[in-house]
Amino acid sequence: MNNHGKVYIIGAGPGDPELLTLKAKRIIDDADVIIYADSLVPAEIAGFAKPGAQVYGSKEMALPEIMEVTLRAVSEGKTVARIQSGDPALYGATLEQMRILEREQVDYEIIPGVSAVFAAAAVLKAELTVPEVSQTVIMTRAEGRVPMPEGEALVDLARHHSTLAIFLSVTRMFRIANQLLEAGYRADTPVAVAYRVGWPDEKIIRGTLADIAEKVREAKITLQALIIVGKAVDPELLNPDSEEQVAVSHLYSDEYTHLYRRAGQGSHADADRADLYDAGGYEIHPEPAAPTPASTGDD
Ligand SMILES: C[S@@+](CC[C@H](N)C(=O)[O-])C[C@H]1O[C@@H](n2cnc3c(N)ncnc32)[C@H](O)[C@@H]1O
């Protein structure tokens, strides 16, 4: 396509306009055409558009129509801000748009945003990767109309007992809880359901695998909610007087040497010793040298 237009696929965050990145805001301010996901992105964000910009809500538009508006604008040399919720890389249907832009040789760029999973963690005051509790976050969805690829069924993922962030699935809360219980999760595993985080009607429901589904039903939550399962969302972890001991991260522990600080030297050792340490920024244990494999001639 011979033109000077450009498309920006922008992550708008979970809803709170103040969670837009400065870059996203600047691009929206300057764009000629705004196409925003009006089911999950507030009109206030589209309202940053300059006077005269064309603004479309995409919730009632199908992909061909969205792309028609986009390509027409680009062919006229215009800038298009395609605004999506959270971060475009998660459940954003961005690949299908990018493939068309690639085919049409349109210049485009992706601007990351704050995913609902991180906005929810913030509201819950939860660290999703707590040392010795969970060091892994699985972001997934329950199977519905979209089939899950082999090995990604909830029961398969549940084997890891890591923190689970489940998108697009709150209507299946009973089935999810049952599947996780069948997969060996304890009935008292903490669960948080975060509804419309960053919106004025935001709601947080906390419970356990045993009672969360009933609580969600009582609260009549049927959409726009994220489910987070795992010990990492146990509010008791925040209690400084709790019996539960929480392991301290190695990164700030006085007993660990890392890139910017030697063990036992408080915060006084600093980056001028960087050459002594691994750039990984964590504890260094010299690894035993791996035997050099005999060349197979394949590499
Ligand atoms: C189409 S996906 C988009 C996800 C988005 N790309 C992200 O990174 O957050 C929509 C799902 O994301 C979650 N979600 C998006 N915005 C949310 C919000 N403000 N509060 C809670 N969950 C949200 C819900 O699970 C919802 O069903």
Image (cartoon, helix red, strand yellow):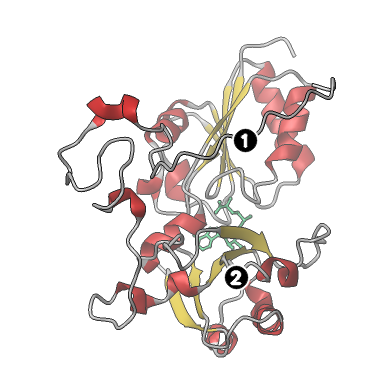
Q: Is residue 124 above or below residue 119?
A: below
Q: Check the image and name the residue furthest to the top.
A: 2
Q: Is residue 114 above or below residue 297?
A: below
Q: Name the quarter showing ligand 1.
A: bottom right
Drawn side of residue 1 relative to residue 28, left or right: right
Q: The residue tagged with tag 2: helix, strand or loop?
A: loop
Name the foreground residue: 69 vs 19. 19
Tell me the quarter of the image containing the N terminus: top right
Residue type at mark 1 is Ala
Name the foreground residue: 157 vs 191. 157
**Residue 285 pos. (x, y %):** 43, 43
**Residue 267 pos. (x, y %):** 17, 43
**CA separation, marks 1 and 2?**
32 Å
Instruction: Residue 161: give its label.
Output: 2
**Residue 254 pos. (x, y %):** 23, 52
Who's the residue at 65% across and 64% down the image? 168
Name the foreground residue: 270 vs 128. 270
Q: Earlier in the sequence, mark 1 or mark 2?
A: 2
Drawn side of residue 247 relative to residue 80, left or right: left
**Residue 141 pos. (x, y %):** 68, 63
Q: Is residue 294 above or below residue 176?
A: above
Residue that label 1 marks: 290
Q: The residue tagged with tag 1: helix, strand or loop?
A: loop
Who's the residue at 82% across and 61% down the image? 147
Q: Residues within 10 Å of mark 1 (few under 14, many from 20)?
A: few
Drawn side of residue 293 relative to residue 109, left or right: right
Tell me the quarter of the image containing the C terminus: top right
Q: Residues within 10 Å of mark 2 (few under 14, many from 20)?
A: some
Examine the image and state in which quarter residue 224 appears: bottom right
Instruction: Residue 241: give its label.
Output: none
